[in-house]
Image (cartoon, rainbow, N blue to C red):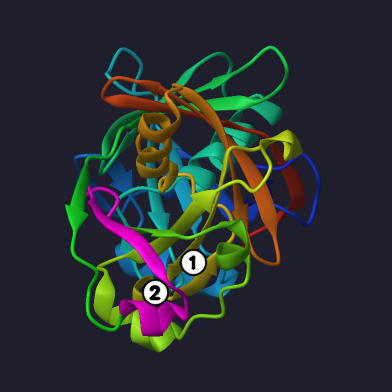
């Protein structure tokens, strides 16, 4: 079967967030059935994701016509399966459309419900994800020390996100982080998203963020689409606008355009296929 490496939330190779994408033919999926359809055995999926060794590898297979979704989709880090992943969903939609496996909007059946993806006129792909709730929290003991930065505010996010959202004083503080990843494991079931207002919106973005996920085997995720379902309502409430652009990343960076639609958040970005090969397993 084919496996592709796609850089998501970027229009240039070797930037954005890379994801593995495996499109499974129904004949490749004899293993088990569940709410998202039939996939090979979980242990095989996990081994492939560990071999790819990117923050996420997406596995998708087509569903029968006429249902609530068109494709079943799951995401695995090198260490575990996750409930939601934005960049690997964007990467999967990109592969479906560039290979002709799908045309028009695509609906994915996932552990977080049905997620949509549509190609825009300018070539970008817009994802339709559930908006995360935000719960103000006291600053956890030891979190500032683990990050090595002064904390302005902390919020919990919805279960499908599972991150702590941590506002820092400014963009320079976010960009300069060198956290203690082992210490961060104690503070979130999935990860810690740090964020701040853009120093100068004329640079083309409204806020910045970086995401650290050592609890699921990822020290830093370059561009985390799912985290923007919390970042979008957080900064939209602050700035008074439904449509924003976020800049995320340390060594690798990318842009996510966000738009609030009530209980849904639209995430728009581009993607580039970098590797297209065969999986001999």
Magenta run includes residue 137: no
Q: Nearer the viewer, residue 180 or 252?
A: 180
Side (left or right) of 192 relative to 140: right
On the image, which quarter does residue 200 sit in?
Answer: top right
Give the vertical position of 158 relative to 184 (above or below).
above
Give the vertical position of 193 relative to 214 (above or below).
above
State the residue at coordinates (26%, 24%): 263
On the image, which quarter does residue 64 sit in?
Answer: top left
Side (left or right) of 47 relative to 208: left
Marked residue nearer the N-terminal end (2 or 1): 1
Q: Position of residue 126 (x, y in %)?
A: 53, 25
* Element carrying mark 2: loop
Side (left or right) of 131 relative to 257: left
Q: Where, quadrant-wise, is the C terminus in this rendering?
A: bottom right
Give the vertical position of 280 relative to 126 (above or below).
below
In the picture, the disc for residue 213 is: none
Stretch in magenta:
143-163
Mark nearest the camera among 2 and 1 is 2
> Disc 2 marks which residue?
79
State the residue at coordinates (55%, 57%): 170
State the residue at coordinates (41%, 45%): 226
* Element carrying mark 1: helix
> Disc 1 marks which residue?
49
Res. 101 in view: no
How many neighbours does mark 2 have within 10 angstroms: few (below 14), some (14-19), or many (20 or more)? some
Give the vertical position of 236 relative to 106 (above or below).
below
Q: Position of residue 55 (x, y in %)?
A: 52, 64
Res. 254 in view: yes
Q: Nearer the viewer, residue 174 or 110?
A: 174
């Amino acid at each position: 079967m084919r496996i592709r490496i796609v850089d998501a939330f970027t229009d240039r190779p070797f930037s954005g967030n890379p994801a593995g994408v495996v499109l499974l033919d129904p004949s490749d999926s004899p293993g088990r059935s569940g709410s998202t359809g039939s996939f090979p055995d979980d242990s095989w999926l996990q081994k492939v994701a560990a071999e790819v060794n990117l923050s996420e590898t997406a596995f998708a297979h087509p569903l029968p016509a006429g249902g609530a979704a068109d494709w079943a989709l799951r995401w695995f880090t090198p260490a575990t399966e996750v409930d939601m992943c934005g960049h690997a969903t964007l990467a999967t939609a990109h592969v479906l459309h560039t290979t002709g496996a799908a045309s028009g909007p695509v609906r994915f059946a996932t552990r977080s419900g049905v997620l949509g993806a549509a190609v825009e006129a300018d070539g970008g792909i817009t994802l339709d994800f559930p908006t995360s709730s935000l719960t103000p929290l006291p600053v956890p003991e030891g979190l500032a020390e683990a990050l090595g930065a002064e904390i302005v505010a902390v919020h919990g996010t919805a279960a499908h996100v599972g991150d702590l959202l941590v506002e820092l004083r400014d963009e320079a503080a976010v960009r300069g982080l060198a956290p203690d990843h082992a210490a961060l494991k104690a503070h979130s079931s999935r990860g810690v998203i740090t964020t701040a207002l853009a120093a100068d919106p004329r640079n083309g973005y409204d806020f910045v963020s970086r995401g650290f996920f050592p609890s699921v085997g990822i020290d830093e995720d370059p561009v985390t689409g799912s985290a923007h379902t919390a970042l979008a309502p957080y900064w939209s409430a602050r700035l008074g606008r439904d449509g924003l652009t976020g800049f995320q990343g340390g060594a690798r960076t990318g842009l996510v355009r966000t738009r609030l639609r009530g209980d849904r958040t639209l995430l728009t970005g581009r993607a580039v296929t970098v590797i297209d090969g065969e999986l001999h397993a």
